[in-house]
Image (spheres, rainbow, N blue to C red):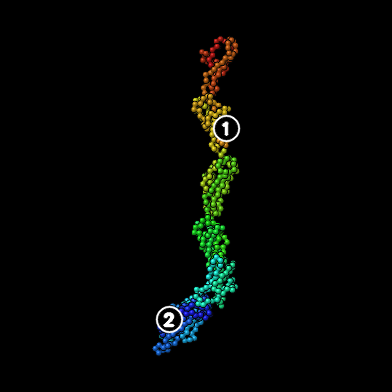
Amino acid sequence: MSFSAAAAATGFVVLFLSVTVGQDEPDWSVKYDPTQICALRGSTVEIKCSYKYPSRINRIKTEVKTRFWFTKENNRVPLDLKKDSDYNSRITYDFDKSSSCNLTIKDLKQRDSAEYKFRFITNQPGGKFTGSPGVTLTVTDLRVQVRRSETQTELKCESSCDLTKPASYVWFNKEKKMKQQTSSIVVSVADGDKYSCSVKGHENHRSPSVYAPEILSAKLMSSGQITEGRSVTLNCSSDANPEAKYTWRKNNNQSVVSKDHQFVFSSILSSDSGLYYCTAQNELGKKTSGPVSVQVTYAPRPPSVSVTPSGYIMEGSLVTLNCSSDANPEAKYTWRKNNNQSVVSKDHQFVFSSILSSDSGLYYCTAQNELGKKTSVPVSVQVTYAPRPPSVSVTPSGCIMEGSLVTLTCSSDANPEAKYTWRKNNDQSVISKDHQFVFSSILSSDSGLYYCTAQNELGEKTSGPVSVQVTYAPRPPSVSVTPSGEIMEGSLVTLTCSSDANPEANYTWYKEGEKAPKASGQNFTITNIILKQRKLLL
């Protein structure tokens, strides 16, 4: 085995490895020189070959009937390259000399990379021979290697083939030739620059261009409404060489949220809503996309409810109940009072322009969109107001007998709760400080007009008078005589009887020693008094 350098037919310099098939030069042999060839795409390569065979076998002269090259087999039968439509116009067999078997391939394609073998068939029985192993052809392309430092960008034209002698290069930017002819150049990259290179003399076979990212596309891969909990993918792509690296940022934040061309939310949250930007970057520059809007939809969160003003709510004041809930789409609101299912308002604000005491209660707010609903905890509205005119009752009702148990009860609607005081007649002295005024054994002297006053910090109200009239038997009567002093027989005398009683007493006059009444009424008048009338009984 030996190394040798040879030039391809078109002048490209390639590296060859030479080996002879067969050991000690056997009678049947194929010799390739070299056995490994590396060539550039678009060039022409010549694979050199020679073969030999016995001139006679069993006194029969050996004649070659068929000679060809192949890379493929069909049912273990080699297929002639000349019959392959991909090769027939690009290959040439050189069989001019009896031992020559050269193969020339022009306009090399990367798909031409293969192991090439030569086969010949003679007139001798079993006189077929294939040179194996064959020649390994590797077709490669020129490429531009980019190296970037803080101060400059270096481009190097190179190939995986080791070129054995220095080549002259042609550099292009935007399809226009540049002055530089070395394998490495330093450039200042501007927008739209596209650099490529070729070996001089083969300008039609350039390397792929290198350029900064362009045609940047950033988009949301999920269609329709994005509901919370779904898997969502943002995809970013760009045309760039060298291949771009990608970063994602959210809103105006410079923090990187992803370093992949795809940004995947396996279970997206409402907090993931926002504008996302993709930046594609390689050694030649970078480009940032326009914003991709991600709007996550979700059912309302538990509503938050507030009351304005806070603290005491006075009757007649302006009061606003406010309900808010985080939701997307925006929630619609309804208000209900206590356990009643009737809706009292359909706005996020429930306004009492002049609140009444009857508006006191527990209020619930429900936030709802097409994805669900949530109801708030109750908010208590307690309206404060001065006492209403008190209501007073007497127990027992009807006749009140002296000595009985009597209760006066006073009640008034008020918030805060009222405190009560009792007064009698026009006296300002307080006789009780309870809503009930109790006579355990009522006296006649307790008769009168009673007033109850209900009071809290917002005001006071006094009831109308309630009359308490205690009934009792007549007290011992008192009798008076008019005229007083000495009474002359035959004069006019008036007797008057009075007794404290309730109901008022009826009076009957009797004469001592007589059972039959003499008169009725409080006054008894004797018009012509005689001596025997001096003693009368009431």
Residue occupying image coordinates x 51% and y 61%:
258
Q: For residue 445, say whether it is visible.
A: yes
* Residue 18 horizontal/vertical position (percent): 45, 80
Residue at numbered disc 1:
462
Q: Nearer the viewer, mark 1 or mark 2?
A: 2
Tell me where residue 458 sits by quadrant. Answer: top right
- Compared with 67, 378 (above or below) is above
* Residue 486 horizontal/vertical position (percent): 58, 10
Of residue 480 and residue 289, the one placed in the foreground of this image is 289
Tell me the distance, in whole angstroms, between the alpha carbons under discs 1 and 2: 132 Å
Residue occupying image coordinates x 57% and y 64%:
287
Of residue 482 and residue 313, the one placed in the foreground of this image is 313
Q: Amino acid at mark 1?
A: Thr
* Labels 1 and 2: the sequence-earlier one: 2
Seen as rendered, the residue at the extreme bottom is 59
Residue occupying image coordinates x 47% and y 84%:
100
* Residue 446 horizontal/vertical position (percent): 53, 26
Q: Total number of numbered labels?
A: 2
Tell me, for residue 77, which label it has, or none: none
Of residue 271 and residue 81, the one placed in the foreground of this image is 271
- Compared with 476, 278 (above or below) is below
Residue at numbered disc 2:
21
Residue occupying image coordinates x 47% and y 80%:
4
Which quadrant holds the N terminus?
Answer: bottom left
Of residue 103 and residue 403, the one placed in the foreground of this image is 103
**Which element type, helix, strand or loop, lies under badge 1?**
strand
Tell me where residue 27 sits by quadrant. Answer: bottom left
Other-residue count near label 2 (Cα within 10 Å), few / some / many at <14 / 14–19 / ≥20: many
* Residue 358 horizontal/vertical position (percent): 56, 40
Q: Amino acid at mark 2?
A: Val
Q: For residue 139, say whether it is visible.
A: no
Seen as rendered, the residue at the extreme front is 151
